[in-house]
């Protein structure tokens, strides 16, 4: 049975879901699961729930728990990464300092000043993890859930030979949204999606051979439907394809939506994927963080059962272990030109076939030029952030922020430079050495 290491297992709700997913497959139900986190309290909560899953059912899995990362990684076959580096203080800086300058981020974990600086504080630890893996489990598959997905995975593609993929649920969640908008069962959608993480495009979307795009265009003329996903419907209207991730997230990846208070207010009608008002994701995150500290009090271990969620990780492991063929949208290197009009060095999100022989990204060819252009507006920011982080190049970080679509729409170059310097100074304890 495989040895599966969870790094960042103190994220109890998410770790509980993934452990349950793994144990739900009979072929994996005897797995050796190792939970690791530096937060002993949260790690203990996750361990109690995972142990209860095993004890309350007839599975033969073993649950180990450790605060020692190397102990967790030793001999692992699969490594699931869900770390959060730095906690509250840098997150507040990443949101509030840009806000003082007039950059109104929505989430701040993927692109923009927030995504860039989250990547800078996360990458040193990520690189330490894969360095340990090169020594202790060089053949293990590294499965990343931590954002900013594209930047972190891109850096690992360049810095390690450890096989790395990024997992995100935005494609199935978007399929669910489309199915709801056009009134068809979500499990009956047939789709082909490609692009980058949080900005991948439904190039084809069908039901029983019928192209659903005409029905989706008709659906968005219904004001009650349009208001549920304003940004994505606007992008669809002007660029011709429906995009993954929620309107709330997508509003900060483009220059069109978050520079005018009235326009931001117009977006507040969006309710799909828990739309929140400007910048309150930070407050919500802080509240949920406090709840996690007492999460076990709300769960009766005797009632814990094994359930399977929509997450990909367990299905990927099952496919690799049992030679069961499945297709997933995964974040992988574009080195083999899966998308031919995006950079070969980029991290792309494309369909991948997975079976006992491995993970096989599909050939997508060229994206429509307007969609590739929107992707490239984010890719250039990602590229410079990776360069700045790996080379310790302060100027590349400045250039990344200056090329960010939202920031560039809101500020002058000098204002961006001043804001970036303030972010660098405020977050210096969390960042790699820069010169």
Image (spheres, helix red, strand yellow):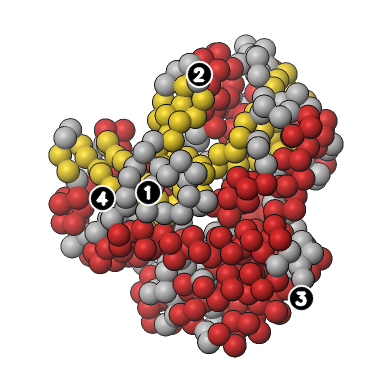
Looking at the rendered image, the disc whose residue lies closer to the viewer, 2 or 1, is 1
Mark positioned earlier in the residue sequence (3 or 1): 1
**Which quarter of the image is occupied by the C terminus?**
bottom right
Mark positioned earlier in the residue sequence (4 or 3): 4
Measured as percent of width and height from the top left, residue 135 is found at: 79, 32
Q: Mark 4 points at which residue?
A: 181
Q: In the depicted view, which residue is nearer to us: 58 or 358?
A: 358
Q: How crowded is mark 1: few (under 14 residues within 10 Å), some or many (20 or more)?
A: some
Location of residue 256 by image quarter: bottom left
- At x 64%, y 61%, the residue is 387
**Are the residues at dot 4 and dot 3 in contact (C-beta closer than 8 Å)?**
no
- At x 22%, y 40%, the residue is 206
Q: Mark 3 points at which residue?
A: 425
- At x 48%, y 16%, the residue is 323
Residue 332's place in the image compared with 343, above or below, is: above
Mark positioned earlier in the residue sequence (1 or 4): 4
Q: Name the residue under label 1.
A: 340
Q: What separation in Å lies between label 1 and label 4 (alpha carbons)?
A: 31 Å
**Are the residues at dot 3 and dot 2 in contact (C-beta closer than 8 Å)?**
no
SS for tag 4?
helix
Mark positioned earlier in the residue sequence (2 or 1): 1
């Amino acid at each position: 049975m495989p040895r599966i290491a969870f790094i960042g297992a103190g994220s109890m709700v998410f770790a509980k879901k993934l452990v349950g997913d793994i144990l739900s497959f009979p072929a994996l139900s005897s797995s050796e699961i190792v939970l690791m986190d530096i937060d002993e309290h949260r790690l203990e909560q996750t361990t109690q729930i995972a142990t209860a899953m095993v004890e309350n059912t007839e599975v033969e899995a073993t649950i180990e728990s450790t605060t020692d990362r190397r102990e967790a990684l030793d001999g692992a076959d699969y490594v699931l990464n869900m770390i959060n580096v730095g906690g509250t203080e840098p997150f507040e800086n990443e949101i509030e300092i840009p806000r003082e300058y007039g950059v109104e981020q929505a989430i701040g974990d993927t692109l923009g000043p927030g995504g860039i600086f989250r990547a800078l504080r996360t990458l040193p630890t990520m690189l330490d993890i894969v360095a340990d893996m090169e020594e202790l489990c060089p053949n293990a598959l590294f499965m990343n859930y931590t954002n900013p997905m594209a930047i972190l995975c891109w850096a690992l593609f360049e810095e390690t030979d450890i096989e790395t993929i990024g997992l995100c649920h935005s494609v199935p969640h978007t399929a669910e949204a489309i199915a709801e908008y056009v009134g068809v069962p979500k499990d009956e959608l047939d789709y082909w999606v490609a692009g980058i993480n949080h900005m991948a495009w439904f190039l084809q979307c069908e039901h029983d051979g019928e192209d659903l795009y005409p029905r989706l265009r008709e659906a968005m003329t219904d004001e009650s439907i349009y208001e549920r996903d304003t940004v994505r419907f606007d992008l669809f209207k002007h660029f011709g394809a429906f995009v993954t991730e929620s309107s709330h997230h997508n509003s900060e990846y483009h220059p069109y939506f978050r520079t005018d208070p009235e326009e931001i207010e117009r977006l507040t009608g969006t309710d799909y994927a828990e739309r929140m008002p400007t910048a309150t994701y930070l407050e919500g995150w802080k509240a949920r963080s406090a709840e996690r500290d007492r999460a076990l009090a709300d769960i009766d271990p005797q009632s814990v059962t094994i359930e399977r969620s929509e997450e990909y990780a367990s299905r990927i492991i099952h496919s690799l272990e049992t030679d069961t063929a499945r297709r997933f949208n995964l974040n992988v290197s574009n080195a083999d030109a899966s998308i031919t009009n995006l950079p070969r060095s980029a991290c792309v999100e494309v369909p991948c076939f997975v079976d006992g022989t491995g993970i096989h990204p599909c050939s997508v060819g060229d994206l429509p030029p307007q969609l590739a252009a929107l992707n490239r507006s984010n890719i250039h920011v990602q590229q410079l952030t990776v360069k700045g982080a790996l080379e310790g190049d302060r100027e590349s970080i400045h250039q990344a922020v200056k090329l960010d679509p939202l920031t560039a729409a809101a500020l002058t170059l000098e204002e961006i430079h001043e804001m970036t310097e303030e972010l660098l100074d405020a977050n210096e304890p969390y960042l790699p050495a820069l010169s």
